[in-house]
Image: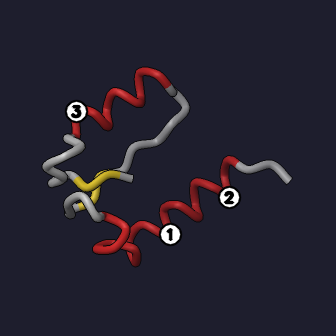
Amino acid sequence: MWGKNDPIFLPDGARAYLRDVPEAELHFFDTGHFALEDKADEMIPVMRDFLARNLTK
């Protein structure tokens, strides 16, 4: 989950995580540094989907 317009943590920094954690997922949202505050309605379903697919019971 990343704000593609974040002036502090740039998108290339987000992509670096994929090199270190290949099974990670990266989702960009049209927002800035406070992505969850701006786009919670879009981000929460993505988080829930990821957790449903990756958490074991």
* Residue type of the residue flagged with mark 1: Pro
Mark number for residue 12? 3
> Residue 54, how many percent across, how many down?
68, 47
Q: Secondary structure at mark 3?
A: helix
Most foreground residue, 7 or 11: 7
The amino acid sitting under disc 2 is Ala
Residue 56 lies left or right of residue 28; in this view the side is right
Compared to 11, does 45 lie above or below? below
Residue drawn at x 24%, y 58% as measured from the top left: 33
Seen as rendered, the residue at the extreme top is 19
Q: Which residue is mark 1?
A: 45
Disc 2 residue crowd, few under 14, some 14–19, many 20+, Cα 10 Å: few
Instruction: Using residue 5 as the reference point, say whether residue 29 is left or right of it.
Output: right
Query: N-terminal of the two: label 3 or label 2?
Result: 3
Residue appearing at x 22%, y 40% in the figure = 11
Res 38 → quadrant? bottom left
- Element under label 1? helix
The residue located at (58%, 61%) in the rendering is 49
Residue 36: x %, y % from top left = 37, 67
x and y, in percent, of residue 31 in the image: 21, 63
Mark 2 residue element: helix
Q: Is residue 14 above or below residue 44?
A: above
Q: Is residue 56 left or right of residue 19?
A: right
Q: CA distance from mark 3 to mark 1?
A: 24 Å
Q: Are marks 3 and 2 in contact (CB under 8 Å)?
A: no
Q: Which mark is residue 52?
A: 2
Q: Nearer the viewer, mark 3 or mark 1?
A: 3
| Residue beneath the point at 20% across and 60% down | 32
Badge 3 density bin: few <14, some 14–19, many ≥20, Cα 10 Å: few
* Residue 41, x across and y down, in percent: 40, 78
